[in-house]
Image (cartoon, helix red, strand yellow):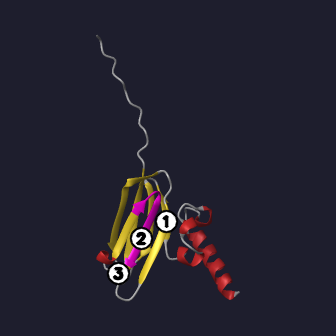
Amino acid sequence: MSNLMNTEMGLANRAARNPVGFLEWDPFRSLFGGWNAVSAVEVTREETGYRVEVPVAGFAPSDIDVSYEDGVLTVSGKSEKRNFTRTFAVPEDVDPDGIHAAVAHGMLTLSLTLHPKAQPKKITVNVN
């Protein structure tokens, strides 16, 4: 019972710190596999897309694999002592070619850029 309360209290504190509205946010949360896994990942909505931060302390960049297929982003890491996998449902407005990953100071940062919005096109009228 106390574990459930700690989890709920942690989520409430986290929601208060998250300007996106953590408890209202669902595209990435749905495939985490449980609330405990969610607490280790930060998802932030930005003007140009989303930023996902996954702690990867103890893993070399070569130990980390990031892949995207059919709207699902998978992050996995494997070292001599441990391994992990996180799976994310990617919103439809994300451009698959605009997904970038970088590791710094034990944190994997995924940048997911939105599809460019359709811009009006000026059509020139030619004289025949």
Residue at label 2?
A: 75
Question: Callout 1 environment at 10 Å: few (<14), some (14 to 19), or many (20+)?
Answer: some
| SS at mark 3 in the image | loop
Name the N-terminal-most of marks 2 and 1.
2
Q: Main secondary structure of the magenta part?
A: strand
| SS at mark 2 in the image | strand
What residue span does the magenta drawing correspond to?
68-77
Residue at label 1?
A: 88
The amino acid marked with disc number 2 is Val
C-alpha separation, residue under disc 3 versus residue under disc 1: 20 Å
Quadrant of the snapshot with the N terminus: bottom right
Tags 2 and 1 in contact by the CB under 8 Å rule? yes
Residue at label 3?
A: 59
Residue in the picture at 44% in, 79% down: 84
The amino acid marked with disc number 3 is Phe
Q: Residue 18, position in %: x, y? A: 55, 67
User: Please, is residue 48 above or below residue 42 in the view?
Assistant: above
Residue in the picture at 54% in, 71% down: 32
Name the N-terminal-most of marks 3 and 2.
3
Q: Residue 26, position in %: x, y? A: 58, 62
* 3 or 2: mark nearer the eye: 2
C-alpha separation, residue under disc 2 versus residue under disc 1: 8 Å
Residue in the picture at 38% in, 30% down: 121
In this view of the protein, which residue sits in the foreground, 66 or 43? 66
User: Please, is residue 122 above or below residue 7 in the view?
Assistant: above
The amino acid marked with disc number 1 is Phe
